[in-house]
Image: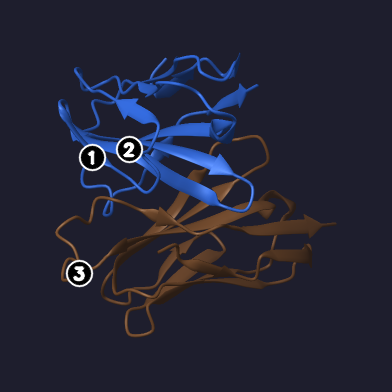
Amino acid sequence: DAGITQSPRYKITETGRQVTLMCHQTWSHSYMFWYRQDLGHGLRLIYYSAAADITDKGEVPDGYVVSRSKTENFPLTLESATRSQTSVYFCASSERQGASYEQYFGPGTRLTVT
Amino acid sequence: QQPVQSPQAVILREGEDAVINCSSSKALYSVHWYRQKHGEAPVFLMILLKGGEQKGHEKISASFNEKKQQSSLYLTASQLSYSGTYFCGTSPSPSLSYNTDKLIFGTGTRLQVFP
């Protein structure tokens, strides 16, 4: 199906483990974003990418790594998961420059770190 | 800096109106508005770019006051389907930053509409 998908939708992991959240979009949008959503904080930008092989930090990048070898994929890796990274993670994409064009959000991944 | 949204929560009866405000301490290039229903992803409502243009989307409209660095979302004759959390996202003026790609979201305003 066309659109933006995330996997897995739910994940439980242990402290210290590496976890990778996947994001895939079929629109060939240039821009892709990773947000985390926590009660009281709204949506906070972790990393974003303007094109394949171009990434930049957002507001809360510590503890996360991203890559973008292909336009359609933008995986987010937690190198050593901590309990503070328990959150709902949303991936989003945008056709062009993020501030001028609407962002399309994926369904989210609920991550629990025990 | 995160934009500040007010109020934090609104409770309405069907048919009533509401205004949600979004204020920034920095000069803005654009303001986005999104609505998120419980357990779902945020969905785009509208973008307002520098220029003070007012936009509309069904019975939902918004304004952008550059001088005051704020935007307001107007919901008129609210419907049950309007329930959800509303987020504004702002990007800084190019005069402040070369990078207008990033959106900084507010903490949201929870709107509940009852019959």
Rounded to the nearest angstrom, the CA distance separating label 2 from label 3 is: 20 Å
**Percent position of residue B24, x then y:** 41, 72
| Element type where label 2 sits in the image | strand
For the C terminus of chain A, which image quadrant? Answer: top right
2 and 1 marks in contact (CB < 8 Å) = yes
Query: Would you name the residue on which mark 3 appears?
Result: B96
- The relative height of residue A69 versus residue B109 in the rendered view (above or below) is above
Q: Callout 2: 10 Å neighbours few (<14), some, many (20+)?
A: many
Specify the chain shown as blue: A
**Both on one chain, marks 2 and 1?**
yes
Rounded to the nearest angstrom, the CA distance separating label 2 from label 1 is: 6 Å
Q: Amino acid at mark 2?
A: Tyr
Name the subunit of mark 1. A
Query: Would you name the residue on which mark 1 appears?
Result: A56
Residue at 17% x, 66% y: name it: B94
In the rendered view, how is the structure colored?
by chain
- Image disc number at residue A47: 2
Q: Quadrant of residue A91?
A: top left
Is residue B46 in sight in this rendering? yes
- The relative height of residue B13 versus residue B81 in the rendered view (above or below) is below
The answer to whether residue B79 is left or right of residue A22 is right
Residue at 77% x, 65% y: name it: B12
**Percent position of residue A110, x then y:** 59, 26
